[in-house]
Image (tube, grey):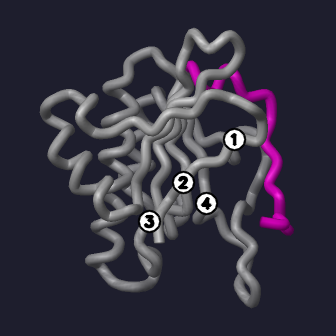
Amino acid sequence: MGVGAMARARLPLDSILPDTYPEELRARGWELHRTGRFAHFAVFPGRGYQAFHWLVLYGKSGARHGGQEKLEWTERALEFAFEVGAALGDAPVAVAGDFNLEPEESDSVARALATGAWRDLAAEHGSAATCFAPGAAPSRIDAVFANRAAAAAVTGIRVVEDCPW
């Protein structure tokens, strides 16, 4: 179990470790990193001068219906991801993943969106559902949130319902 990243084009991709975070975020960063459920990647598109940061999170399975502990873990992890993103300043940042929690069900997402610094890309670009599990109703437990700099680079999104990998 774990999270990762894949670039569909030949772009430099670096894994960013919590040692680079501000002091107050390092311990929590390493704790979350060691779970295999959080990863931070930087992609260098274009001429490679500006990093685009991806904070990828795999929320606890059952966070929606599996008990308070799983929900609280996922909420703390989401809050941490948004804190790291904010610490990156004006760099483009996306918080993405399978959160196992609908955005509307998350207090951490609600707080992040309320700041005006983060945007829900699926909601803005017309995608109602992002997860199509067999035997279940479509949901939005998979999501991408972007800060202003990252959102400015997005012209649209597409949900691949039947991905071959």
Measure the C-alpha gap from mark 3 to mark 1.
22 Å
Would residue 4 be seen by someone viewing this image from the given angle?
A: yes
Q: Secondary structure at mark 4?
A: strand
Residue visible at 52% across and 38% down in the picture: 54
Percent position of residue 149, x then y: 57, 19
Q: Which mark is residue 7?
A: 1
**Sequence-earlier tag: 1 or 4:** 1
**In the image, farthest residue toward the bottom:** 135
- The residue singled out by tag 3 in the image is 59
Q: Earlier in the sequence, mark 2 or mark 3?
A: 2
Badge 4: residue crowd in 10 Å (few <14, some 14–19, many ≥20): many
- As shown in the figure, which amino acid type bears the numbered disc 1? Ala
Q: Which residue is the site of mark 4?
A: 142
Snapshot quadrant of residue 16: top left
Relative to 72, is 126 on the left or the right?
A: right
- The image shows residue 92 at horizontal and vertical percentages of 53, 23
Q: Reading the chain from its start, which is encountered first: label 2 or label 4? A: 2
Seen at 23% across and 49% down, the residue is: 30
- In the image, the segment drawn in magenta is 149-165
Instruction: Tell me if 23 is positioned left or right of 113 in this view.
Output: left
